[in-house]
């Protein structure tokens, strides 16, 4: 995880590496599969309950994206990585920045509806599943491109891997007087 920032800089200049890969909403089946087999073992209790994730998915399928190898289709086993990027309502943004809401309290009511453009998003999690270096590069490039579609992206890391991802994406503490550490709201703008 400590090398993600270096990898982003290196691979962003090599966008041709994403040929043969795509980023799109994952199926609910794939989300459930990776929740049980990949995410829960890694994040444990720090992860939102599956029922909340399913409600968020039903409210806005674009909140959960997978990077896929195009040649393998979109089955759960062909996912190179998953990124949870929740497009949030303006009221939700205010709740996040005033410390009245963190990721664990977020639910489907805080998301912008499917098809509605949102200026802000909340990075709930990002995980690279594949061990293949080309898959990892494609995941990083496509995830960064998706993140940069928003005016600002927030994260509230509660695990060391989550903090590493936030820092690797260039996120800084929202309040300038705070240090970049667990339990601190981060923003990329």
Image: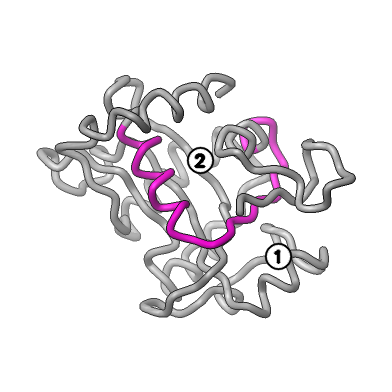
Q: In which quadrant will I find the N terminus? A: top right
1 or 2: mark nearer the eye = 1
Percent coordinates x, y for residue 12 in the rendering: 37, 33
Q: Residue furthest right?
A: 177
Q: Nearer the viewer, residue 9 or 57?
A: 9
Is residue 158 rendered magenta in the image?
Answer: yes
Numbered badge on residue 61:
none
Mark 2 neighbour class, 10 Å CA radius: few under 14, some 14 to 19, many 20 or more = many
Percent coordinates x, y for residue 68 in the rendering: 24, 42
Label 2 element class: helix
Tell me the quarter of the picture where residue 101 sits. bottom right
What is the magenta range?
Answer: 138-162
Tell me the quarter of the picture where residue 58 sits. bottom left
Q: Is residue 82 left or right of residue 72?
A: right
The earlier-in-sequence mark between 1 and 2 is 2
Q: What residue is drawn where x is 62% and y is 48%?
A: 47
Q: Nearer the viewer, residue 128 or 149?
A: 149
Q: What residue is drawn where x is 38% and y is 64%?
A: 62
Q: Nearer the viewer, residue 42 or 170?
A: 170
* Distance from the alpha carbon under mark 1 to that under mark 2: 18 Å
Percent coordinates x, y for residue 133 in the rendering: 32, 20
**Pointer 1 with pointer 2, Cβ within 8 A:** no
Is residue 169 rendered magenta in the image?
Answer: no
- The colour scheme applied to this rendered structure is one colour
Percent coordinates x, y for residue 8 in the rendering: 45, 30
Residue occupied by mark 1? 105
Q: Is residue 132 above or below residue 45?
A: above
Residue occupied by mark 2? 39
Q: What residue is drawn where x is 55% and y is 38%?
A: 169
């Amino acid at each position: 995880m400590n090398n993600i920032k270096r990898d982003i800089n290196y691979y962003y200049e090599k966008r041709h590496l994403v040929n043969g890969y795509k980023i799109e909403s994952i199926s609910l089946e794939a989300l459930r599969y990776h929740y049980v087999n990949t995410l829960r073992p890694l994040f444990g209790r720090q992860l939102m309950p599956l029922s909340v994730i399913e409600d968020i998915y039903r409210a806005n399928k674009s909140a959960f994206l997978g990077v896929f190898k195009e040649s393998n289709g979109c089955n759960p086993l062909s996912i190179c990585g998953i990124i949870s990027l929740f497009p949030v309502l303006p009221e939700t943004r205010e709740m996040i920045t005033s410390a009245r809401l963190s990721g664990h309290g977020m639910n489907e009511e805080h998301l912008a509806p499917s098809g509605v453009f949102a200026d802000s998003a909340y990075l709930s999690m990002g995980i690279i599943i594949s061990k293949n270096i080309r898959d990892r590069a494609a995941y990083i490039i496509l995830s960064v491109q998706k993140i940069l579609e928003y005016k600002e992206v927030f994260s509230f890391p509660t695990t060391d891997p989550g903090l590493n991802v936030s820092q690797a994406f260039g996120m800084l503490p929202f309040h300038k007087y705070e240090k970049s550490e667990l339990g601190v709201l981060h923003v990329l703008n």
